[in-house]
Image (tube, rainbow, N blue to C red):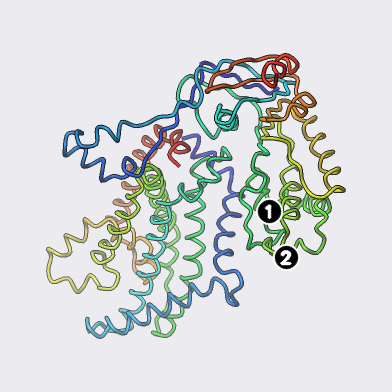
Amino acid sequence: MAQIQFIQAGVEIPIFNASSRSLKTRLMQVATGGRLSADQSGHVVMRALQDLNFTLSDGDRVGLVGHNGAGKSTLLRVLSGVYHPTHGSVVSEGYVASLIDVSLGIDHEATGRENIFLRGALLGLTKKEVSAKLNEIIEFSELGDFIDMPMRTYSSGMHLRLAFSVSTVIRPEILLMDEWLSVGDEGFKHKAEERLTELIQATKILVIASHSRDLIMKTCNRVLWLEHGNIKMDGAPDAVCQAYFG
Amino acid sequence: MNEILSSFKKLSLISTLGLHDIRGRYRRSAIGPFWLTISMGVMIATIGVVFGQIFRSPMDEYLPFLAAGIILWAFFTGTINEGCTGFIEAEGMIKQLPIPLFVHILRVLWRNLLILAHNILILPLVLLVMGKGIGLEALLAVPGLFLVAVCLSWIALLCALLCARYRDLAQIVVSVLQVAFYLTPIIWMPSLLPDRMGATFLQFNPFYHLLELIRAPLLGAVPSLTSWLVILVIAIVGWGFTLLVFSRLRHRVAYWL
């Protein structure tokens, strides 16, 4: 069973300018009784999320909508466990994985094969597990002999194909996405679509941030509308999309 | 505490990343990481000849001492300096994946242990050339290295944590280590110290004890009980303090990057 519970959760991100980040200013501040830097070191914080209360449980397919800067990405980061809420609490049960940046950790100088291991390790797989899935991954990516070439020789489409192939071998309970992943040429796109749909069906909770009405209507059964770090609306796709997209 | 322990469950990730760091650095070079060994060997030979003359030390004693000292020092400073940027360089990962933070420190430690493994090859060579053997005492270097690694890992973790917040700290650490290099008997032998004062002064240098724990056994001596005790205490107290700071600040790191 997977569950995520937000209780009065909020996130404040401190903004450091170059000066308040340095130790010198800190020391100077002590020496001058804090007067000198009173105006600049007043720790600017950005309230990215405020007092969120909601619970996600098995079977939820949640779409996140909202304008740029509404807090969608921050919320995804809190969900993934990267950001710990500065206020309130978040209780999360279940193995979380994200398909937000499928290229994370990929080294252009290394070969495709090495990158499969690297990427696999970052996804939490052991060397053995990656080895067991190696052939499946290579086959799916359709890279053929290119798999032993350095990644810098790849076209961007090939690069994404490999990243996608590795990143989708996992079967998380909670899956986070930022827009739909669309990879490769026509033939591959179709295959990738299938793989992704299958992955989503296997997960217990899906959270996807999107600006696309079609996507939300197609994949989600619940939509959260964020505005200025608050939930403006939480409900069925029909109702929220009607209100948000107009 | 849990976070530290759960890091050890990620050993596969750590070894992959650490190995990858080394591979990446020497990709497309014919002899790869053995450049490390060669450049270290050249440095030891140069310093050995020059300072051996200046200090008028007998070469068969001075050169192995210097070689062991410089190799280990490179390991200490490598771990601590790279520890300072441990979180900063892993920003992409920290902001995307909820990997235990200590993983990034273990990666630095592992990378530097691999470098040490390449460099240490010089020592038997030097001993051979100087016609010296290696005794059974050398086995004591293993527990010594372990304890030193425990010690270095808290230093690196603390540095990584504080440097993520205060970026100039890394520069300060570099300078401090530079000074420590000259204060620690690496290119000069403790026997050169004029009197008891100097020897007493030496006992207050933690780097001296860190070094002795591994260097002494490699050169056929048993490290003093004082060295063992000092490093043991530093390891325990240091970890206690670091855990305290770490448990309070670890959730902030992602926001600082």
Q: Secondary structure at mark 1?
A: helix
Identify residue for label 1.
A117
Between marks 1 and 2, how big is the CA–CA gap? 15 Å
| Residue at x-position 56% and y-position 26% | A70
Q: Is residue B150 toward the left or the right of residue A128 in the image?
A: left
Amino acid at circle 2:
Met
Q: Nearer the viewer, residue B117 or A8?
A: A8
Q: Nearer the viewer, residue A28 or B22?
A: A28
Q: Vertically, is B211 above or below A122?
A: below
- For disc 2, the neighbor class at 10 Å (few under 14, some 14 to 19, many from 20) is some
Q: Are marks 1 and 2 on the same chain?
A: yes
Please identify the quarter of the rendering in which residue B141 is found: bottom left
Q: Residue A6: horizontal and vertical position, in percent?
A: 57, 19
Q: Residue A105: horizontal and vertical position, in percent?
A: 61, 51
Q: Vertically, is A37 above or below B56?
A: above
Identify residue for label 2.
A149
| Residue at x-position 45% and y-position 64% | B139
Is mark 1 in CB contact (under 8 Å) with mark 2? no
Amino acid at circle 1:
Phe
Q: Chain of mark 2?
A: A
Q: Residue B71: horizontal and vertical position, in percent?
A: 40, 69
Q: Residue A22: horizontal and vertical position, in percent?
A: 31, 45
| Residue at x-position 48% and y-position 51% | B89
| Residue at x-position 32% and y-position 42% | B237
Q: Secondary structure at mark 2?
A: loop
Q: Chain of mark 1?
A: A
